[in-house]
Structures are given as C-alpha cells and as structure tokens.
C-alpha cells in the first residue's frame, strides 16, 4: 500500500505588513518539532522574504486582498508557495550598493534548493521554493 502523504497546510493573511510576522510564526509552528531547529530559521527567513514581496509587489489592496501560503513536505524538501493577486513575474535583479531594496529574491535564490514563479489558474502569481530536510530530523 502506498504511503499517504501529509495534507498541505494552508493559510490566508491580509495583505498588510503585520502579516509578515504572523506568517513566519505560523509556518514555524507547523513544522514537526524535530525539524524546527534544522529548518526553522531558513524557512522563517524564506517566509518573511516571500510574504514581504507579495505584499509590496503583488498588486494587493490592503483592505480587500489576501496573501496565501501553502506548506507541504515532498521529495525530501519542505515546499512553500506564497501567492498574491498580482500578475507580475518576480525576477532576480542586481541592485546597486546604494539600493535599499531588491535583495529579497537573491536571498531566496541562495536559501532554496529550487524556486520558481507560476501563474495561478484564475488570478495571481505564486512563488514556490523548497528547502531540503533530513528525514527523522
């Protein structure tokens, strides 16, 4: 009989800066206890960067829109998808040394084993990134 996979965890947060901390905390708390010390910091940083980008660049109306997160384990990774209502496609840029922003996806690129941007079927964009974990923590 095949192993039944875990059900992905799903959250919706208002498109507001206070949601960054709430999302980071929710993701960390959903990890199995044994993985928190191995994966918690990197996954928290990844969550913060992706949620911040979604709020700042995702065509969000603070009073109406939500940022969605889905977290699931598969193929030796924890995968995080952060979705917003915008249709833009986030891209890596090389900010100059005086820039105060533009480094979030560089951080994601360095942390994640793999990441991609996918359009959502009806409206919006998802950024999906994976971090490896060792089975058994």
Image: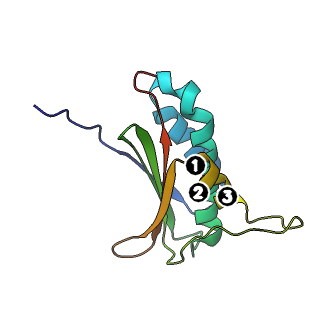
SS assignment at label 1:
helix
Residue 119, given in percent of the width and then of the height, sits at: 42, 72
Labels 1 and 2 touching (C-beta < 8 A): yes
- Quick check: 102 above or below 109? below
The quarter in which the N terminus is drawn is top left
Point out residue 68 in the picture as x, y percentages from the top left corner.
46, 58
Q: Write the residue at 61% across / 39% down.
A: 42
Q: CA distance from mark 3 to mark 2?
A: 11 Å
Who comes first in sequence, dot 3 or dot 1?
Answer: 1
Label annotation for residue 107: none
Please give the residue where the numbered disc 1 appears in the rendered image.
Answer: 47
Figure check: 74 above or below 110: above
Mark 2 Cα-neighbour bin, 10 Å: few <14, some 14–19, many ≥20? many
Q: Residues within 10 Å of mark 1 (few under 14, many from 20)?
A: many
Residue where numbered disc 2 is placed: 50
- The total of numbered circles placed on residues is 3
Label disc, if present, on residue 106 of the rendered structure: 3
Q: Would residue 75 appear left or right of 42 to someone viewing this image?
A: left
Q: CA distance from mark 1 to mark 2?
A: 5 Å
Q: Is residue 5 left or right of residue 123?
A: left
Q: Residue at x 64, y 67 (%)?
A: 92
Q: Are marks 3 and 2 in contact (CB under 8 Å)?
A: no
Residue 132 lies, in percent from the top left, at: 48, 38
Residue at 57 percent across and 76 percent down: it is: 59
Disc 2, SS: helix
Location of residue 43 by image quarter: top right
- Measured Cα–Cα span from mark 3 to mark 1: 14 Å
Q: Is residue 104 above or below residue 94?
A: above
Q: Secondary structure at mark 3?
A: helix
Toward the viewer: 57 or 78? 78
Q: Earlier in the sequence, mark 3 or mark 2?
A: 2
């Amino acid at each position: 009989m095949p192993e039944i996979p875990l059900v992905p965890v799903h959250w919706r947060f208002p498109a507001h800066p206070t949601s960054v901390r709430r999302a980071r905390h929710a993701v960390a708390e959903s990890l199995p206890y044994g993985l928190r010390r191995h994966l918690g910091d990197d996954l928290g940083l990844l969550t913060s960067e992706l949620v911040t980008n979604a709020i700042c660049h995702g065509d969000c109306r603070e009073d109406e829109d939500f940022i969605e997160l889905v977290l699931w384990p598969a193929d030796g990774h924890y995968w995080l998808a952060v979705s917003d209502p915008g249709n833009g496609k986030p891209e890596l840029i090389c900010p100059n040394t005086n820039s105060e922003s533009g480094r979030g996806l560089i951080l994601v690129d360095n942390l994640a084993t793999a990441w991609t941007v996918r359009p959502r079927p009806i409206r919006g964009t998802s950024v999906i990134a994976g971090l490896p974990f060792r089975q058994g923590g």
